[in-house]
Image: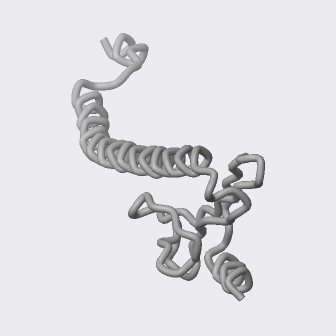
Amino acid sequence: MKKLMKNKKGFTLMEMLIVIAIIVILVAIAVPTFTSQLSKANSAANDANMRAAKAQAAATYLADTSKYAGKTLYFDAVDGTVDESYNGITAYGKGDEDGNIIKITIDNNGVVTATWVEAGAAEEESGSENN
Protein backbone atom coordinates (compact mmCIF):
# COMPACT_ATOMS: atom_id res chain seq x y z
CA MET A 1 0.00 0.00 0.00
CA LYS A 2 2.88 2.34 0.69
CA LYS A 3 4.10 1.76 -2.83
CA LEU A 4 0.76 2.92 -4.26
CA MET A 5 0.78 6.17 -2.25
CA LYS A 6 4.26 7.08 -3.47
CA ASN A 7 3.23 6.83 -7.13
CA LYS A 8 0.22 9.12 -6.76
CA LYS A 9 1.07 12.69 -7.65
CA GLY A 10 -1.19 15.72 -7.77
CA PHE A 11 -2.89 18.34 -5.64
CA THR A 12 -5.10 17.66 -2.68
CA LEU A 13 -8.65 19.00 -2.62
CA MET A 14 -7.66 21.58 -0.01
CA GLU A 15 -4.81 22.94 -2.18
CA MET A 16 -7.19 23.27 -5.15
CA LEU A 17 -9.77 25.12 -3.04
CA ILE A 18 -7.13 27.56 -1.79
CA VAL A 19 -5.95 28.29 -5.34
CA ILE A 20 -9.54 28.84 -6.52
CA ALA A 21 -10.21 31.14 -3.55
CA ILE A 22 -7.14 33.24 -4.39
CA ILE A 23 -8.22 33.53 -8.03
CA VAL A 24 -11.74 34.59 -6.98
CA ILE A 25 -10.32 37.28 -4.69
CA LEU A 26 -8.09 38.65 -7.45
CA VAL A 27 -10.98 38.74 -9.92
CA ALA A 28 -13.18 40.48 -7.33
CA ILE A 29 -10.53 43.19 -6.98
CA ALA A 30 -9.78 43.55 -10.70
CA VAL A 31 -13.31 43.74 -12.16
CA PRO A 32 -14.47 46.94 -10.39
CA THR A 33 -11.16 48.63 -11.17
CA PHE A 34 -11.42 47.71 -14.84
CA THR A 35 -15.05 48.82 -15.00
CA SER A 36 -14.31 52.23 -13.48
CA GLN A 37 -11.37 52.81 -15.83
CA LEU A 38 -13.55 51.83 -18.79
CA SER A 39 -16.23 54.33 -17.80
CA LYS A 40 -13.59 57.07 -17.37
CA ALA A 41 -12.23 56.31 -20.84
CA ASN A 42 -15.72 56.44 -22.35
CA SER A 43 -16.41 59.75 -20.64
CA ALA A 44 -13.13 61.24 -21.89
CA ALA A 45 -13.86 60.03 -25.42
CA ASN A 46 -17.33 61.60 -25.29
CA ASP A 47 -15.85 64.91 -24.11
CA ALA A 48 -13.25 64.85 -26.88
CA ASN A 49 -15.89 64.08 -29.51
CA MET A 50 -18.04 66.94 -28.25
CA ARG A 51 -15.11 69.39 -28.43
CA ALA A 52 -14.29 68.20 -31.94
CA ALA A 53 -17.91 68.62 -33.02
CA LYS A 54 -18.00 72.16 -31.61
CA ALA A 55 -14.74 73.03 -33.39
CA GLN A 56 -16.01 71.58 -36.67
CA ALA A 57 -19.30 73.49 -36.36
CA ALA A 58 -17.44 76.73 -35.67
CA ALA A 59 -15.04 76.18 -38.57
CA THR A 60 -17.92 75.37 -40.94
CA TYR A 61 -19.76 78.51 -39.92
CA LEU A 62 -16.65 80.62 -40.36
CA ALA A 63 -15.90 79.14 -43.78
CA ASP A 64 -19.40 80.06 -44.92
CA THR A 65 -19.08 83.62 -43.66
CA SER A 66 -16.89 85.71 -45.93
CA LYS A 67 -16.41 88.49 -43.36
CA TYR A 68 -13.85 86.29 -41.55
CA ALA A 69 -11.63 85.81 -44.63
CA GLY A 70 -7.99 86.62 -43.90
CA LYS A 71 -8.46 86.55 -40.12
CA THR A 72 -7.12 84.48 -37.24
CA LEU A 73 -9.60 83.34 -34.62
CA TYR A 74 -9.39 81.35 -31.39
CA PHE A 75 -11.78 78.55 -30.39
CA ASP A 76 -13.12 78.33 -26.82
CA ALA A 77 -13.44 74.65 -25.90
CA VAL A 78 -15.88 75.20 -23.07
CA ASP A 79 -18.37 77.52 -24.75
CA GLY A 80 -17.92 76.25 -28.31
CA THR A 81 -17.46 79.82 -29.48
CA VAL A 82 -14.87 81.57 -31.62
CA ASP A 83 -13.34 84.97 -30.92
CA GLU A 84 -10.86 87.21 -32.69
CA SER A 85 -8.81 87.79 -29.53
CA TYR A 86 -7.20 85.31 -27.18
CA ASN A 87 -8.62 87.00 -24.06
CA GLY A 88 -11.06 84.77 -22.23
CA ILE A 89 -10.42 81.66 -24.32
CA THR A 90 -10.38 78.44 -22.28
CA ALA A 91 -7.31 76.28 -22.94
CA TYR A 92 -7.24 72.50 -23.26
CA GLY A 93 -4.95 70.53 -20.99
CA LYS A 94 -3.23 71.30 -17.71
CA GLY A 95 -4.62 74.76 -17.09
CA ASP A 96 -5.31 78.09 -18.71
CA GLU A 97 -1.65 79.08 -18.72
CA ASP A 98 -0.14 75.65 -19.50
CA GLY A 99 -2.74 74.23 -21.90
CA ASN A 100 -3.24 74.50 -25.63
CA ILE A 101 -5.89 76.26 -27.65
CA ILE A 102 -7.17 75.87 -31.18
CA LYS A 103 -6.13 78.66 -33.51
CA ILE A 104 -8.31 78.91 -36.62
CA THR A 105 -6.90 80.72 -39.62
CA ILE A 106 -9.05 81.53 -42.64
CA ASP A 107 -7.22 82.63 -45.77
CA ASN A 108 -8.70 84.93 -48.42
CA ASN A 109 -9.86 81.91 -50.45
CA GLY A 110 -11.97 80.67 -47.52
CA VAL A 111 -9.67 77.75 -46.63
CA VAL A 112 -9.93 77.05 -42.90
CA THR A 113 -6.86 75.76 -41.04
CA ALA A 114 -7.03 74.72 -37.39
CA THR A 115 -3.81 74.26 -35.40
CA TRP A 116 -2.85 73.64 -31.76
CA VAL A 117 -1.03 76.56 -30.16
CA GLU A 118 0.37 76.84 -26.65
CA ALA A 119 -1.75 79.22 -24.59
CA GLY A 120 1.17 81.58 -23.88
CA ALA A 121 2.18 81.72 -27.54
CA ALA A 122 -1.41 82.44 -28.58
CA GLU A 123 -1.59 85.30 -26.09
CA GLU A 124 1.59 86.82 -27.54
CA GLU A 125 0.32 86.40 -31.13
CA SER A 126 -3.06 87.90 -30.24
CA GLY A 127 -1.37 90.86 -28.57
CA SER A 128 0.91 91.50 -31.55
CA GLU A 129 -1.99 91.26 -34.04
CA ASN A 130 -4.05 93.76 -32.07
CA ASN A 131 -1.20 96.33 -32.03
Quarter of the rendering occupied by the C terminus: bottom right
Residue shown at the point (67%, 61%) measured from the top left = 116
Q: Left or right: where does residue 8 sit relative to residue 20?
A: right
**Colour scheme in the image?**
one colour
Point out residue 85 in the picture as x, y percentages from the top left corner: 58, 76
Q: Left or right: where does residue 81 sit relative to residue 102?
A: left
Residue 73: which quarter of the image?
bottom right
Residue shown at the point (58%, 66%) measured from the top left = 74
Point out residue 23 in the picture as x, y percentages from the top left corner: 31, 36
| Residue closest to the eye, 2 or 76 | 76
| Residue closest to the eye, 68 or 76 | 68
Total numbered labels:
0
Q: Left or right: where does residue 32 sit relative to residue 118?
A: left
Residue shown at the point (70%, 55%) measured from the top left = 106
| Residue closest to the eye, 1 or 67 | 67
Point out residue 22 in the picture as x, y percentages from the top left corner: 29, 40
Residue shown at the point (61%, 76%) measured from the top left = 119
In the rendered view, would you say 62 is above or below 91? above
Point out residue 42 in the picture as x, y percentages from the top left corner: 38, 43
Quarter of the rendering occupied by the N terminus: top left
| Residue closest to the eye, 68 or 92 | 68
In the rendered view, would you say 51 is above or below 131? above
Residue 125: which quarter of the image?
bottom right
